Amino acid sequence: MAHPSNSFPKGFYLLDEDQVATGDFYAIQCLTAGTITVKGSGIYEYDSGFSETAATADVSIALPAGATIYGAFTSIDVGATAKCIAYYK
């Protein structure tokens, strides 16, 4: 069995002021409110027929300060307003 510390974050990026990070991220914590744009696998959107479709383009998400989202992100763009911590393994 693997040691529990193997599941801890290996590091993080502090992103602000139009910075873009690419990598293998699993969580994004928003420090100041703003809109971020993400890419990655496992991102789904509901269309007008209430069916789930995989997002094929960038997805913009408005986050309040203190919010954390989880997923499989490969690119994070914080825009001009948000300040975030992006965690990777």
Image (cartoon, grey):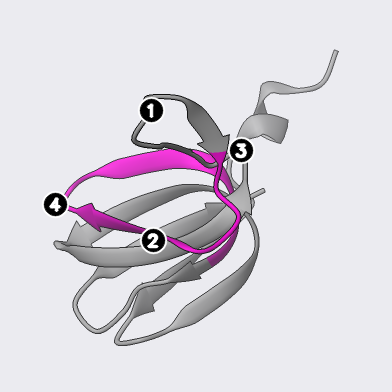
Q: Which residues are magenta?
A: 54-75
Residue 21 lies, in percent from the top left, at: 55, 74
- 3 or 2: tag closer to the N-terminus: 3
Label 2 sits on a secondary structure element that is strand
Label 4 and label 3: CA atoms lie apart by 22 Å
| Mark 3 to mark 2 CA distance (whole Å) | 20 Å
Percent x, y of residue 45? 44, 39
Chain-order first, disc 2 or disc 1: 1
Q: Which residue is labeled 4 in the image?
A: 64
Tag 4 secondary structure = loop
Nearer to me, 18 or 45: 45
Give the residue furthest to the right. Answer: 1
What label does residue 49 carry, if any? Answer: 1
Q: Quadrant of the N terminus?
A: top right
**Mark found first going from the N terminus, 4 or 2:** 4
Q: Amino acid at mark 1?
A: Gly
Mark 1 and mark 3: span between their CA atoms? Answer: 20 Å
Q: Amino acid at mark 2?
A: Ile
Q: Which residue is mark 3?
A: 42
In the rendered structure, find residue 85 and report the number of the disc placed on it.
2
Decide which of 80, 87 is in the foreground and name it: 80
Q: Whole-percent x and y of residue 83?
A: 26, 70
Circle nearer the viewer, 3 or 2: 3
SS for callout 3: loop
Tag 4: residue type?
Answer: Pro
Residue at 35% x, 86% y is: 18
**Which residue lies most toward the top here?**
1
What separation in Å lies between label 2 and label 1 (alpha carbons)? 34 Å
Point out the tag, 4 or 3, that comes first from the N-terminus. Answer: 3
